[in-house]
Amino acid sequence: MELVAGSYEQVLFGFTVHRESGTSGDPETWTPVADFTHHAHTASLSAVAANSRFVVTGSKDETIHIYDMKKKIEHGALVHHSGTITCLKFYGSRHLISGAEDGLICVWDSKKWECLKSIKAHKGHVTFLSIHPSGKLALSVGTDKTLRTWNLVEGRSAFIKNIKQNAHIVEWSPSGEKYIVVVLNKVDVYQLDTASVSGTITNGKRISSVTFLSDSVLAVAGDEEVVRFFDCDSLVCLCEFKAHENRVKDIFSFEIPDHHVLVTASNDGFIKMWSLKQDKKDPPSLLCEVNTGARLTCLGVWLDRGIDEKASLPPAAEPSPENKEQPKKIKKESGDVILEEAPGPNSKKCDLIGDSKESTKGSSPVSTKKRKRTDVLEKKRKKKT
């Protein structure tokens, strides 16, 4: 088990968590031990995600870096986006979906690290996305004040809902029967069967992160020191506890045998692991903590579980040759090539996860050395001119 956290200081921290059984009735002890620090990004980190093999990080430097956690080496970088990476989500062992301030949502093959599809998802920034537990649907929110539903089976936009405000978080419940949309300090709870709001939860301050602890209990963190647990059905606060000395930036929960764990990261530099009680009205107990000495921005947990149960997203319908729009190549100053959706009558019905054998040119992993060398050559060329 490895805790990974990104920071304003551009550094990714990794801590291996050692568990030791207690002796003579003493409880089990959890100890985070520094494993690595990595300074690959040139701006603050904004997102992190993990599957059974890789950890990926997104940054304000517009790149996604890939780390092979089995071999403990950097695997390369994805340079497709032209804006801050706002969200990264793995689905099983085969797919990664990324969103950024360029309005694009990209679907990646996380075996070959090829871009399977790049679509213009929002007119403004993509602020967050979430994949349904079945892998058949995804939700995204953006600064164009819309909530968009994506049909991943048919590979098209399924529904657009105007929500009148800019939402910054959207999340499916574990069963996929409900989802939540966060605007500032309010959480709207939607039921999937009606696609309507069944209730609204109000937090004390602006919400920075949420995670479902069960299908009906939501953990909420915001611009304050406390974390609250809310019942999504009754909308009442079940409990709250002081987690940090400064605002909580990100939270993450997972289950392993004998433990349901909540992990929190804060501007105060601490990463903390909490053991959740069966009754969520009871505050969790602290398992362990570690001080990074940095202002943390995002958090992930890498669990060495072997092969994920969810292998991949369902295969999408291949577009017919006559309707298959050719993406438009755009050269960036750094020499990278990105692709944009070509406008056309079928542009709304986009093939989101097409298993096309043609990868997106210029979107395979670029080694850090090669990317830096390209930047240096570009600077020298500019000086000569």
Image (tube, helix red, strand yellow):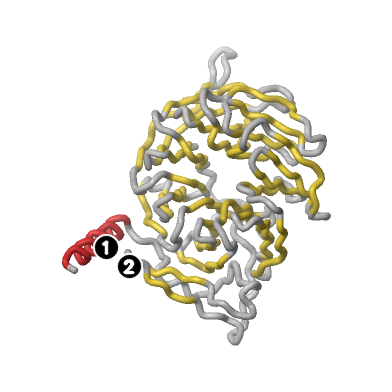
Res. 284 image quadrant:
top right
Query: Judging from the image, what secondary structure is the residue with disc 1 in?
Result: helix
- The local crowd at label 1, few if under 14, some if 14 to 19, many if 20 or more residues have their Cα within 10 Å, is some
Dividing the image into 4 quarters, which one contains the C terminus? bottom left
**Rendered position, 31 above or below 109:** above
Q: Residue furthest bottom?
A: 322
x 72%, y 35%: residue:
202
What amino acid is at disc 2? Gly
* Residue 276 location (% of width, % of height): 65, 28
Q: Position of residue 182 (x, y in %)?
A: 66, 44
At 65% from the left and 73% from the top, the residue drawn is 349
Residue placed under numbered mark 2 in the picture: 335
Q: Is residue 72 visible?
A: yes
Residue nearest the viewer, comparing 93 with 169: 169
The quarter holding residue 213 reads top right
Q: CA distance from mark 1 to mark 2?
A: 7 Å
Would you say 28 lies left or right of 145 here?
left
Q: Secondary structure at mark 2?
A: loop
Residue sitting nearer the eye, 91 or 125: 125
Q: Is residue 254 visible?
A: no
In the rendered image, which residue does mark 1 sit on?
Answer: 374
1 and 2 marks in contact (CB < 8 Å)? yes
The number of numbered discs placed on residues in the rendered structure image is 2
The amino acid sitting under disc 1 is Thr
Q: Nearer the viewer, residue 114 or 44?
A: 44
Residue 358 x/y as whole percent? 48, 75
